[in-house]
Amino acid sequence: MAGNNAPVSFPAYMRAGEQRLSLIVFLCLSLVIWALMKVWYPMPFLFPDSGSYVHSAVDGMLNVYRPMGYSNYIAFIHDLSPRIGTLFNVTFLLSTLAILWLLYSVKYLWGLRSDWMFYLLGVASIAAPRIIFASNFIMSDSLFHSLTLMFITSLLWIMRRRSVVMIVLNVLLLAALYKVRYVGMFYVVFSVLAIVFSARRPGWFGWVWAIIPILVLMRLDHTTADNYEKVTGSRKQGFAGWQLLNNASMLVPKGKNISAKELSQDERVMRSFFAQYPDSLFSTKMALTTDLMWNKSLPYRQLYFYSLNTSPRQPALAWVYMGNLYGDYATKLIKKYPWDYFTGFVLPSFMSNFDRRDIFESVDFKSEPLYSNYFTGVLEEYHAPFNVFGSLNGVRYVLGWVMWAALLASAVWFFARTRRWMLSDSRWRMAFGMILFVVAYLGLLCLASPNTTWRYTLPIYIPSLLFIVYNLRDALSALSERCAASKK
């Protein structure tokens, strides 16, 4: 098989007729999707956060609410061409190339054939509604997803052979992911594991190389904190504090049990302010909807407005200050009531990953000065002729449950079939890496934030499909061998 000792190089492999045919099919499918999107949705999908990203791209000023990576990406695309459609073109192209590189790398490294299963995998990846939608959405999701797929692909190549080129590429992708979303920080664990436990035996050389991504990430984090402090006066990210108190909302009523000596003056004021509201408001349900973070009539935002009126801070700096205050208070609550936090938020947050997450498609586009002044080719108004993505929500929900069930069954099959000798098989290690990434991502997601949208689990969609395909092929092979043995 091509999986462990490939007889030809990857470029030569891609030139073979079998690969060329399937690649032509997938590229034609991508071209059709791109053309339909250009006709049906010439204007991008927008979200309230979209303006914040574009605003930072326009003035280059540090965004105190989120990382600058996606804003820098928008500015880079704008330098190539100021037409608003170019942003979709480049993002869609990057997404397609990332998907194809991963699929054909897996096909090569695992020794797969261009049969019905590989074609189905390709179509399910390229034509996935949320991947397509994200590529025309002025949000960081598609860029983060594409970089994640490329990051995983580089890991697979490192696991096959500890290539210096792939390690360097992997570290660069790790840096880019961190700049787009801070959650990318945990990816460094997979870089280290892939380098140390590559096809070669772990040794001092592997450990030396494994230190590099750690050092790069530490340097990036330190530089980011320095830049953040210059603008806000704080090294802590304000958004993290807001999110943490939201997650610990069900513990807020228990705050009355904490001694005043354990709290700062501002925390005591905050506790008194929250005491004006009914305890029932601070619930698991409210934490999972994140309403307490964003609803202007609820206590977290009300206290923020009060802070604006009683201090000379600018809105953005007041937001950071309140985030630090909220984060410190939430940390004290969680440390005092860890089990209540686990049962009241962590477990429900994990289960929220399996709730229905619809794509809410904005078929009406109305331009704003921010967009029309920065981009060219912006229509004043546009009404999409079809509600394509909204109409597919029901189908997506059913197929989503099918995928979760298949993923669980695949994991049971995978570990039931695992034997010690398989640890030396690079394909087994790659498949194990896939499921480990999916589980780690879901685990971190449920700790960091409740899943309120389809966007959050986008990076684990294709890795999940690949793990399912790996085990489905193994199951079919085992069944075939059993049938052959019974005939004898």
Image (spheres, rainbow, N blue to C red):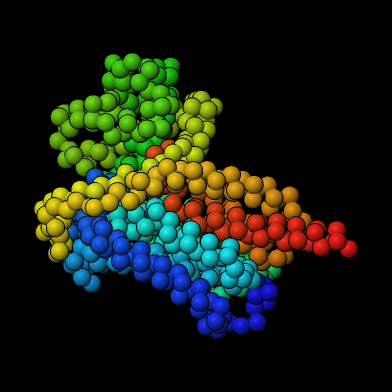
Q: Position of residue 414 (x, y in %)?
A: 68, 53
Which quadrant of the figure contains the N terminus? bottom right
On the rendered image, what quadrant is the C terminus found in? Answer: bottom right
In the displayed structure image, the side of residue 122 where residue 374 appears, left or right: left
Q: Quadrant of residue 370?
A: bottom left
Name the residue at 15% across, 50% down. 366
Please tell me whether residue 445 is drawn above or below residue 95 in the rendered image.
above
Q: Is residue 213 visible to the viewer in this orientation of the structure?
A: no
Instruction: Determine whether, in the image, residue 26 is placed left or right of residue 440.
Output: left
- Identify which residue is drawn at 40% across, 44% down: 393
Nearer to us in this view, 262 or 273: 273
Asked if 265 appears above or below 168 in the picture, the reply is above
Q: Is residue 439 left or right of residue 130?
A: right
Looking at the image, which is closer to me, 85 or 487?
A: 487
The part of the image, by quadrant, that contains residue 304 is top left
Task: Spot the residue most to the right.
Answer: 488
Residue 72 location in percent, x, y?
27, 62
